[in-house]
Each structure stands twice: as structure tokens, then as C-alpha cells.
Image (tube, rainbow, N blue to C red):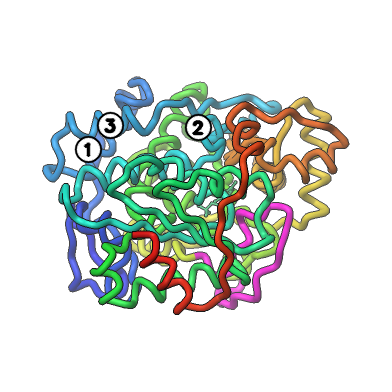
Amino acid sequence: MNLYNLKDHQEQVSFGQAVRQGLGRQQGLFFPETLPVFDDVDALLELDFVARSSKILSAFIGEELAAETVAQMVDTAFQFPAPVVPVKDGVYALELFHGPTLAFKDFGGRFMAQSLAAVSEKDGKITILTATSGDTGAAVAHAFYGMDNIKVVILYPKGKISPLQEKMFCTLGGNITTVAINGTFDDCQALVKNAFDDVALREEIGLNSANSINISRLMAQICYYFEAVAQLPKAAREQLVIAVPSGNFGNLTAGLLAKAIGLPVKRFIAATNVNDTVPRYLQTGEWAPTPTVPTISNAMDVSQPNNWPRIEELCQRQGWGLDTLGYGAVTDAQTAETLRDMNAAGYLCEPHGAIAYRVLNAQLAEGETGVFLCTAHPAKFKEVVDEILEKDIPLPAPLAKHNAMALLSLERDNDFAQLKQVLRDAQ
Ligand SMILES: *Cc1c(COP(=O)(O)O)cnc(C)c1O
């Protein structure tokens, strides 16, 4: 598999290099030079989730890893289902929260861990550094926990993720170090970028990123879009609209990649909260990020979504106008109202999924089938969901266990020197 740097097309890397490096020169994102072609998508859709996903990922990776190796990686990473659940006539939820940390980031995080282990020298140092607005942290921490030759350092904005989210990944210890930063998620992302710019540090500790910029995460996410279509009635295939609750836009990138390699999807909808840089861009053509605003869908509190350049590249290469993307932004009050409506209709959701559901409903045309992505289990946002629905939703077992454990996070300022020390101490 060949990938190029979007900021410097001369920089070309293999899958292994892209996975190990995360980012290229000038903090450029890697993008596949060619996409696999599947002549018979219907046959692909007949396969079970693991077999189909192995085929897709092996086709992307090519000769670099044996098909059996990829199959084993997928088998280890994808040990939980992604069910499609009818919510109302013609509208389905794709539930991506049945993994160990109850969010869709388990798919990307676990395949990334498998990929990194498969492409790394057995005795080299590896330090994963990632910033999280909530769920990436848990998925990455759990995916790597106990792989003792890989150190993991996770930054998050102090006080800006839910207490339960924090408990999920800041209670592990061992090879996992978590750092509460006095700042926003964008500050955390900037610190990560600083670290990657520091070439000496990068080499010293074998720095690697594991957030949604790592190509292996996106590749894994392509697979559940196929899984969704495989579960829908065949008649729905040509009239399918998928709404994606978006923050850093990795999930939507993966969906568009799925379409590019042949998945029958009529159009995608980018749904955000009031951190609406992309919806405003799609409407006005002007890229004008504003300061990040905290919302009840805090995993999407991102005003400078770092996967956007990949979407632009893909659309350009495929000849898709950006005007084919639907979009919409939803306020907290609207999110709460939608959660209540959904609950009244018999579907318990959480703020991120509700945002996608709302925008989907507003834009679904007659005869179309809608799917919205449910990116987290409602109990992961228990405080918010309980208050809005006046309920006391039970904690599923993995959450209850971590909720009872002590927080082990360090606290640091938004200061690169302090981060550097943490990274060295983690070794
Ligand atoms: C990360 C996350 C999102 C946003 O996904 P992106 O790929 O960053 O756009 C949405 N919902 C939840 C629950 C998340 O954790």
C-alpha cells in the first residue's frame, strides 16, 4: 500500500510507515495513492463481518501483510457486533457502541493497536501520544493496555469530558499515562502536534499518534459502513442516506472511503453541534473556525477538524462536488428535545447519535432510507441523558467496574515543556 502526504506529495510511505509515523512532514496527513476496487460488492456484502472486513482491509494493505495476518488482526480487533436497529419507518440506528469502551472508537483503536504491533520492529521503543475529547482515549488505552513494549500517553482537557469517560481510561495505570491539561481539546491537539514537530523527541521515544489521524483507524472504520448496508433490506441499497455525528471528521472520511470503493450510499450528511466550522464552510465556502464551545455532545467539541483535508482530497479525486454532502448543526436545546422525542418513540439514545438523527430526519426525502450512526452507549453520557430524560439509566458492566476505581491522571498546564517531561517519565 502506498500513501502520500497531503501537504507534500513527494513524501510517499508504505502502510507500515504510515501507521508508525501517524503524520508526515509539515504535519501532513497520509492518504492512499490508489483505492482498491471491488467488482462484486453484493458478494462482499454476503460475507460475515470479520471475513468481509478482512477482505476489505487486506485489499487496502496489499502485499505488505499476508492476508492471513490481516484476518487474524481483524479477528482480534472486531470481537463485537455493529447491529442495525430500526428506530422508525425507514430510519435505522447503526449501533457502534458494543465494544469494550462502549464507543465506535473501539473499532479504530483496536485495529490500530493490531496494525502497530504487526508493522513494528520487535525491540524498538514505541510511545503512543494522543489527544482525546472523550472517547478516543478510552478506546486507545484499552486497545494497548498490557502491551508492555508500547507506552501510551493520553491528553485531555481537564473538566471538559464526562466524569464517566474519564474513569473509563484514567484508571488503568501500567503502560497507560493520562494527563489532564488545563486547556481545551484544541490545545491538547496543538500539544500533540508540537511533540510530533520535535524530531529529536520523536526519535528518542518512538513517538506515534493514535487519534483519528492514523490511517489504520480510518481503514477499520470503513468496515462498519459495509456491515450496516449488509444488514439493511436489499431494496434500501440504492436510496441510502447516512448521517454521521462529526467532530474531527474521521468517521465521515471513512464513510466516504467506503462509498469510493463501491458501497452503495446515495449521500452522506455531516451533522455537528454548534462547533459548526464544516457546515458553515459547506454553506459559504469560507473556512472560518471560531473558538471551541463546550456542548453536551462533547466528543464533537472540535472547531478545527483535522481530517477535513482528507475529505477534500477524496472528493476531488472522485469528482464529487462538496455540494453532494448534506450538513446541519444542532444546538444543545435541540439535542435535548430530540433525545426526548426518540425516547418517547422507544429508542434510548445519547447526544451524539441524537444530533445525527435530527439532521437526518430534517433532510431525508420520500423513498430514501436513512441510517444514523450511534457513536456511544447512552450510559457513557449518563449525567446528561439522565437529566434530560429524567431517568436513571443503568451502567453496563464495563463502566460500573471502572467507575469504582480511583483516577490516576496527572495534571499539567498547556505547556510543551511540561508535556516533554511527562513523555520522558513514561518510558
Ligand atoms: C469521537 C466521537 C465523535 C466524532 O467522531 P469524529 O470521527 O471525530 O468525527 C462522535 N461521537 C462520539 C461519541 C465520539 O466519541
The residue at 61%/49% (across/down) is 407
Which residues are drawn in magenta?
Answer: 284-305
Q: Is disc 1 in contact with disc 2, using a CB cutoff of under 8 Å?
A: no
At label 3, the amino acid type is Ser
Magenta stretch contains residue 286: yes
Amino acid bearing label 1: Ser
Asked if the residue at label 2 sits under 8 Å from ligand 1, the reply is no
Identify residue for label 1: 58
Residue position marked by numbered label 3 in the rendering: 54
Which residue is at a point 58% across and 41% down the rendered structure image? 375
Mark identifier at residue 99? 2
Between residues 325 and 20, which one lies in front from this camera angle?
Answer: 20
- Seen at 79% across and 28% down, the residue is 345
Disc 3 residue crowd, few under 14, some 14–19, many 20+, Cα 10 Å = many
Distance (Cα) linking label 2 and label 3: 18 Å
Residue 24 image position (x, y, % from top left):
28, 69
193 left or right, relative to 409: left
Residue 379 part of the magenta segment: no
Pick whichever, 41 or 178, lies toward us: 178
* Element assignment for label 1: helix
Principal secondary structure, stretch drawn in magenta: loop
Between 311 and 389, which is closer to the camera in this rendering?
A: 389
Q: Along the polypeptide, which appears first: circle 1 or circle 2?
A: 1
Which of discs 2 and 3 lies nearer the camera? The answer is 2
- 1 or 2: mark nearer the eye: 2
Query: Which element is circle 3 on?
Result: helix
Distance from disc 1 to disc 2, alpha carbons, whole Å, reads: 22 Å
Picture coordinates of residue 55 (x, y %)? Answer: 25, 32
Q: Residues within 10 Å of mark 1 (few under 14, many from 20)?
A: many
Give the quarter of the image for residue 329: bottom right
